Image: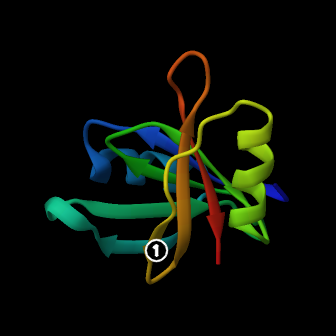
Amino acid sequence: MNAIKIIMIPVSDQQKAKEFYMKLGFQIKVEAPMEHGQTWIELALPNQSTSIALVNFHGIIFETGDIAKEIEELNAKGIEVGKIDHKPWGKFAWLKDPDGNGLSLHQK
């Protein structure tokens, strides 16, 4: 894993949350439709590579240069990782920590 790319923050009202974070100085990186009628709202502070996403679930996305190799290494350590999900914006694979928090590997 190279970096924390996105921290997903569960919110009950995306527009109110977006307004709040924009008042804090965040700027919109992406606002686009998702599956199931949802919207992906991703914001970041100026000149920062780590961003937040205002969604209805929690999680952290870690950037990796080789998702298959990363999964193999994690599996060797006894960490179960889900299958690779191919999306137009990259490859993703989900796992959970011992408390059930969602973590995802992402390769562009």
Which residue is painted at 76% across and 56% down in the image?
70
Looking at the picture, the colour scheme in use is rainbow
Which residue is painted at 68% across and 60% down in the image?
45
Quarter of the C terminus within the rendering: bottom right
Outermost residue toward the left?
37
Is there any visible trace of residue 84 in the rendered image? yes
Residue 63 falls in image quadrant: bottom right
Quarter of the N terminus within the rendering: bottom right
Residue 81 falls in image quadrant: top right
From the image, tell me which residue sits under label 1: 86
Which residue is painted at 29% across and 53% down in the image?
15
Residue 39 or 19: which is nearer the viewer?
Answer: 39
* Left-right relation of 93 to 76: left
Image coordinates for residue 19, horizontal then vertical, percent: 40, 53
Residue 79 or 16: which is nearer the viewer?
Answer: 79
Outermost residue toward the top?
99
Q: Amino acid at mark 1?
A: His
Does 82 appear above or below 92?
A: above
Q: Secondary structure at mark 1?
A: strand
Image coordinates for residue 42, horizontal then vertical, percent: 49, 62
* Left-right relation of 14 to 45: left
Image coordinates for residue 91, horizontal then vertical, percent: 55, 71
Is there any visible trace of residue 25 in the rendered image? no
